[in-house]
Amino acid sequence: MRQQLGYDDIKAAAERIAGHVRPVTVAPAEGLGDSGDAKGAELWLALEYLQHTGSFKARGAQNFLRAHREAGTLPDAGVTIASGGNAGLACAWAALRQGVRATVFLPANAPQVKVARLRSYGADVRLVGTEYAEALAACEEFAASSGALASHAYDHPLIAAGAGTLMEEIHARVPGLDTVLVAVGGGGLFAGVATAARQHGIRAVAVEPEHSRALHAALAAGRPVDVTVDSVAGDSLGARRATALAVDAARPDGDGTGARSVLVPDEAIVRARRELWEDRRILVEHGAATALAALLANGDNGDNGTSDNTGTGTDDTYGYRPADGEKVCVILCGANTDPATLSTSPAPR
């Protein structure tokens, strides 16, 4: 299968998963983020954490399995994935909906709550080793020996296209949108959202923790590269390498417009997550709060968010400062989190 992503892929995904995922709810967020760089902007929240399994991953998982069902390439052995996080949950849920087996590989030290939830979706959970790499190797060996269809958390055009359907819904619900802020781990969500956003003339801003910057580093290098991960949001944004699909989607258009990449410190992520809770009673993962943190990360942005905001993603600026009146949507992409961490997360400095 070609490892490219186009707008036609997202349109096809939208038709394929219609009625099988929850349409996104959007809500105005007046006053939220005024303590940072958002004052004067018109701010909206995309409440994708209300999606099946608690994250956007359900979209890609549904598209992946339904596309293989349509093509007649969904084997009797079912689907397999190495992931104890949102991708694993989404894969198991989508497999249950399709009536096929899901075999999910996890490190043996994975939290029991994740194991229990995966099993509640009917997944065959296999605990291997103590690190993700060991679980992944076992998953690959299982796929080769059993004939099970190997899925991926983010690095596949069908997964990214499914995620991109979120942008189609946001565009329909927020007329005149200028900018969408997207948290980035491996980049599957960003690849899909940025591809759809470009079609509609909307700027997509990739937001990463400063010490978990797989996409930012890839853009600087001109290709995906390995990075170290050390962030409070590392449990969901902890990919060591970004998908090439996201690197392609983040490159600027010929006129210098298009997507942008920015970084945020952990302190801003923690503050954004607490502000969502205290101001809106919205509880999300640190990874989801990272998108909002771009508006709270005080620091030099390198521009003022107006028409010259055309970054290539290779500058080391922090946060995003919208122009007065700019219409901005923040994607809150997941809520599989422990409420107790609201009080135990590192305090902002």
Image (cartoon, rainbow, N blue to C red):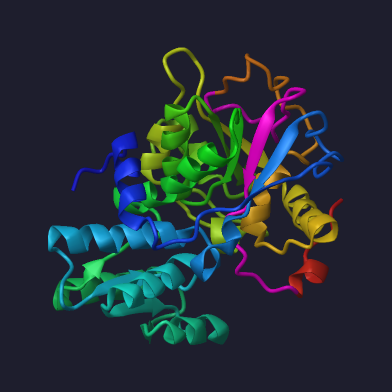
The answer to whether residue 221 is seen in the rendering is yes
Nearer-the-camera pick, 292 or 319: 292
Location of residue 18 in the rendering, given as x and y in whole percent from the top left corner: 37, 55
Residue at 45% in and 81% down: 118
Q: Is residue 335 magenta?
A: yes
Is 170 placed above or below 235 here?
above
Location of residue 190 in the rendering, given as x and y in whole percent from the top left corner: 48, 43
Number of callouts: 0
**Residue situated furthest left in the rendering:** 72
Location of residue 278 in the rendering, given as x and y in whole percent from the top left corner: 85, 59
Left or right: 316 in relation to 145: right
Is 181 placed above or below 160 here?
above
Nearer-the-camera pick, 266 or 325: 325
Q: Is residue 83 magenta?
A: no
Is 253 placed above or below 169 here?
above
The answer to whether residue 226 is seen in the rendering is no
Our reading of the magenta stretch's main secondary structure is loop
Location of residue 43 in the rendering, given as x and y in whole percent from the top left corner: 72, 38
Residue at 81% in and 54% down: 275
Residue at 80% in and 70% down: 344
Nearer-the-camera pick, 183 or 282: 282
Magenta-tinted stretch: 312-339
Residue at 55% in and 61% down: 236
